[in-house]
Image (spheres, rainbow, N blue to C red):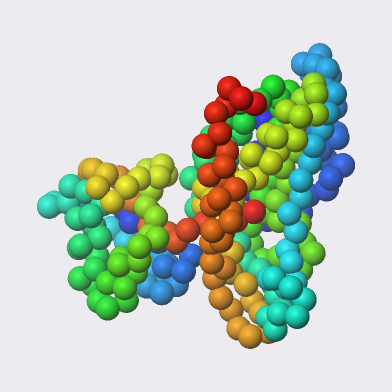
Amino acid sequence: MFIRVQSDDFELNQVKEYFQQYSLQHGAQIGAIVSFIGLVREFQQQRDDKEQVKALTLEHYPGMTESILEQIAQQAKDRWQLNDLIIIHRIGTLLPNDNIVLIATASAHRQDAFDACQYIMDILKTSAPFWKKEQTNQGARWVEARSNDQDAAHNWTKSDPLDD
Amino acid sequence: MINILLFAKYRELLDTEKLELDADNIDSINDIKNHLSQLGAAWQQVFEQSNLLVAINQQMARLDSPVKDGDEVAFFPPVTGG
């Protein structure tokens, strides 16, 4: 598993290289790679919103963040048939369109990679200790947690893992 | 001593990143909350928040979770990463 909290940017081609290395080292047959990248939005909701985001600062709880990400990754590996996975989350000051987070999952067949990728992202949103502060044209403010993120995470816990 | 950490909005509101609290007379997170609430109006306001989250030694905990000497206790608002 490749799990990093970093201020540096990342590239999508790191994903293919990492899983190729994994395949060589483990003699594993990877049939599907799913990747998700979250970006900084310039507008919180719609474009007609008055508040335009100039920059975003991401704060985290060093130590706990890494340990929670490892727990989420392990839960995904326990629940789906995955070869391996990548989680990279950036911290510090970011600008609109900058990368924030990368999740990538590799599996023999696509459904496990799709489901695990979405699971990791949904659980990360509501349980990994990161906080966003936006600098907007109307001033600075801490981003509030959204209830639909809670609903998305909750959906994974109420469904029976045996049904998947 | 119990090491207290504050994050994000709460760190800013209270202008405090970390503090140490004597472990005497402290058995649970609720005891810490009551103790810190006496530091002033802003502290009282933060510790009244219904969505206040708490972790003990970097694992999520509850308000009635027990704490002991040497523990690291962190208070923070709901997370907004990703």
Q: Residue at x 27, y 44 (%)?
A: B65
Residue A10 position (above or below residue A145):
above
In this view, B51 is above or below A36: below
**Residue that extends furthest to the top in the rendered view of this protein:** A27
Q: Residue at x 52, y 37 (%)?
A: A157
Left/right placement of residue B60 relative to residue A79 reads left
* Quadrant assignment, res A54: bottom right
Residue B9 visible within the image: yes
A37 or B14, which is in the foreground?
A: A37
Residue name at image x 69 percent, y 71 percent: A45
Camera-nearest residue between B44 and B51: B51
Instruction: Name the spot of residue B1 as percent of width and height, x first.
Output: 23, 51
Disc count in the image?
0
Q: Quadrant of residue A137?
A: bottom right
Q: What is the x, y in percent for residue A88?
A: 69, 45
Residue A92 horizontal/vertical position (percent): 64, 62
Asked if B41 appears above or below B67 in the picture, the reply is below
Q: Residue at x 56, y 75 (%)?
A: A141
Q: Position of residue B55 (x, y in %)?
A: 38, 48
Q: Looking at the rendering, in which quadrant would you find the C terminus of chain A?
A: top right
Q: Position of B45 compared to A136: left or right?
A: left
